């Protein structure tokens, strides 16, 4: 088992090199620009990053809006120079985009959206077989995220634990379902939450470089302030500890990054009758025109950690029992909207 701090984990993530082609799509399209995007552009200068707010319909417009005549862009879309410093056979000016899950990648497709984080950097060029790789930025990006946590029926969860008391849970054969429930109760009691509080639900806020980091930060800062955090990684599972106890764990494989293993002591639990008790996860539509429309909640069909934090800012986690593991059960209709978040969190 290897101990890692959050800072080290993020440093490892951004230190990886990124394969890119030589031509970056930053030239205008053939037709008129459909819309304009507001983004943040950071430029690597002298070992630090200078941040600019920029607006435009494509990367060329973004760069020129932020940097003016100091940036020279070739006809093929590549950045030729910045402040008179040109690309060379060993280095190249590369535009990177942060994917919102903690990683930088070369923005060869010229992708943009409101709130995107971009970096222009003179990166070392590394030959790999018949292609090149370029060192990714070391700039650390974190975002604020809001979570609604709810257990609609504690009596139901308790009855599940009682009925399945002698059965091991589905993810950890060392613990029974009853023992899982005891751990859940312990977390709630330490936070001063009674049955009524969690059945009503509560909003918490955290910050991180991906949704799972933000979730654990929200749990720590809102429910267990002052608790020391430790992060461990073992056999493809990332584990977050508060005051020495496991509060959250998730898978790290790329396609399922952030898939819950446990949260507040509870794991996906298969019952003898075929039902499942698990944390249902919902995300609020980042393109919603209002923060007061419950129809904008959607059931998560991808792992929590795969959501882009530059777009998604509101999530709901609901511990429920259903006859189908991935059933929405219409819960989103009863979820509060972001407009109901208390002023103390805003």
Image: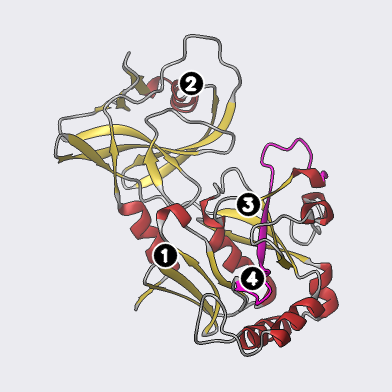
From the top left corner, tell me how far across and down residue 291 is, in percent: 78, 44
Q: Earlier in the sequence, mark 3 or mark 1?
A: 1
Q: Mark 1: few, some, or many residues within 10 Å (few <14, many ≥20)?
A: few
How far apart, in angstroms, are the residues tagged by discs 3 and 1?
A: 28 Å
Residue at numbered disc 4: 219
Q: Earlier in the sequence, mark 3 or mark 2?
A: 2
**Rendered residue at 32%/45% (across/down):** 136
Q: Which mark is residue 300?
A: 3
Q: Earlier in the sequence, mark 4 or mark 3?
A: 4
- Above or below, comparing residue 14 to residue 149 in the picture: above
| Secondary element at tag 1 | helix
Scheme of colours in the image: secondary structure
Q: Earlier in the sequence, mark 1 or mark 2?
A: 1
Q: Earlier in the sequence, mark 1 or mark 4?
A: 1
How far apart, in angstroms, are the residues tagged by discs 1 and 4?
A: 18 Å
Q: Please check the rendered image and state whether residue 288 is part of the magenta-colored stretch, yes or no.
A: yes
> Given this view, does label 4 or label 3 mark the residue nearer the observer?
3
In the depicted view, which residue is nearer to us: 333 or 32? 333
Residue at numbered disc 1: 7
| Secondary element at tag 4 | helix
Quadrant that contains the C terminus? bottom right
From the top left corner, tell me how far across and down residue 76 is, in percent: 31, 16
What is the magenta range?
269-293
Q: Which mark is residue 204?
A: none
| Secondary element at tag 2 | helix
Q: Mark 3: few, some, or many residues within 10 Å (few <14, many ≥20)?
A: some
> Given this view, does label 1 or label 4 mark the residue nearer the observer?
4
| Secondary element at tag 3 | loop
Q: Earlier in the sequence, mark 4 or mark 2?
A: 2
Residue at numbered disc 2: 61
């Amino acid at each position: 088992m290897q101990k890692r701090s959050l800072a080290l984990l993020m440093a490892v993530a951004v230190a990886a090199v990124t394969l890119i082609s030589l031509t970056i799509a930053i030239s205008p399209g053939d037709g008129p620009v459909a819309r304009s995007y507001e983004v943040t552009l950071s430029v690597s200068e002298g070992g630090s990053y200078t941040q600019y707010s920029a607006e435009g319909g494509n990367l060329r417009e973004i760069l020129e809006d932020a940097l003016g005549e100091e940036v020279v862009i070739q006809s093929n879309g590549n950045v030729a120079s910045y402040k008179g410093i040109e690309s060379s056979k060993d280095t190249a000016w590369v535009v990177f985009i942060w994917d919102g899950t903690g990683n930088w990648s070369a923005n060869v497709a010229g992708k943009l959206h409101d709130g995107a984080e971009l970096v222009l950097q003179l990166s070392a060029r590394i030959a790999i077989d018949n292609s090149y790789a370029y060192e990714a930025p070391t700039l650390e990006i974190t975002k604020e995220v809001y979570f609604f946590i709810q257990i609609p029926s504690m009596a139901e969860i308790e009855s599940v634990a009682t009925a399945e008391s002698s059965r091991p849970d589905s993810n950890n054969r060392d613990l029974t379902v009853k023992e899982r429930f005891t751990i859940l109760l312990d977390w709630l009691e330490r936070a001063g939450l009674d049955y009524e509080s969690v059945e009503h639900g509560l909003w918490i806020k955290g910050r991180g470089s991906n949704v799972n980091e933000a979730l654990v930060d929200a749990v720590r800062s809102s429910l267990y302030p002052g608790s020391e955090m430790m992060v461990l990684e073992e056999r493809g599972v990332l584990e977050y500890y508060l005051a020495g106890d496991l509060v959250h764990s998730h898978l790290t494989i790329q396609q399922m990054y952030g898939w819950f293993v446990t949260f507040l002591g509870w794991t996906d639990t298969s019952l003898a009758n075929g039902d499942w008790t698990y944390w249902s996860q919902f995300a609020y539509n980042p393109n919603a025109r209002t923060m007061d429309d419950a129809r904008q909640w959607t059931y998560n069909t991808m792992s929590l950690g795969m959501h882009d934090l530059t777009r998604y800012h509101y999530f709901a986690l609901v511990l429920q029992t259903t006859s189908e593991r991935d059933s929405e059960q219409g819960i989103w209709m009863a979820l509060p909207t972001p407009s109901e978040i208390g002023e103390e969190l805003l």
